[in-house]
Amino acid sequence: MTKVMIEVPDNLHRLVKTVASAKGETMKHFMLRALEFLAKQEANINTNTSDNINEAEADNLLKPYLSKLIDDISSGKEGLVDSKTFFDELTKS
């Protein structure tokens, strides 16, 4: 296995750490899966594009779920959510 060191913006690091933790994974395992998925996706779709999602687009994807979560907490519906439920709800947004 090869070691790769990269600099990651703090906000991306927090997001990756949070998502990996929510899925019960280590950051290393999550990043390996993410890199594999992205590499395969890029190879199958178009290797010449750079359609990376920016921070504003990521925020827009998360806003509906986070708004619902805030509403649930405000109305006393807070509780533990397993990672499958979290990501199922997130993909509905």
Image (cartoon, rainbow, N blue to C red):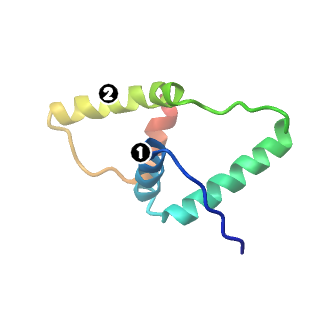
Circle number at residue 41 = none
The local crowd at label 1, few if under 14, some if 14 to 19, many if 20 or more residues have their Cα within 10 Å, is some
Tag 1, which secondary structure? helix
Percent across and percent down for residue 51 are 71, 30
Residue extending furthest toward the bottom: 1
Q: Residue at x 14, y 37 (%)?
A: 76
Residue type pointed to by label 2: Ser
Percent position of residue 77, x then y: 20, 38
Is the residue under label 1 in contact with that under label 2 (CB below 8 Å)?
Answer: no
Residue drawn 48% across the image and 63% down it: 25
Residue under label 2: 67
Residue position marked by numbered label 1 in the rendering: 86
User: Observer-nearest residue: 34 or 8?
Assistant: 8
Of residues 27 and 10, the one drawn nearer to the viewer in this rendering: 10
Quadrant containing the N terminus is bottom right
Relative vertical location of residue 43 with respect to residue 26 in this rendering, above or below: above
| Residues packed near mark 2 inside 10 Å, few (<14), some (14 to 19) or many (20 plus) | few
Residue at position x 53%, y 26% from top?
A: 57
Closer-to-camera residue (33/77)? 33
Secondary structure under tag 2 reads: helix
Instruction: Judge left or right: residue 39 versus residue 85.
Output: right
* Residue 78 location (% of width, % of height): 21, 42
Q: Is residue 44 above or below residue 75?
A: below
State which mark lies toward you, 2 or 1: 2
Amino acid type indicated by mark 1: Phe
Q: Earlier in the sequence, mark 2 or mark 1?
A: 2
How many angstroms separate mark 2 from mark 1 (CA)? 13 Å
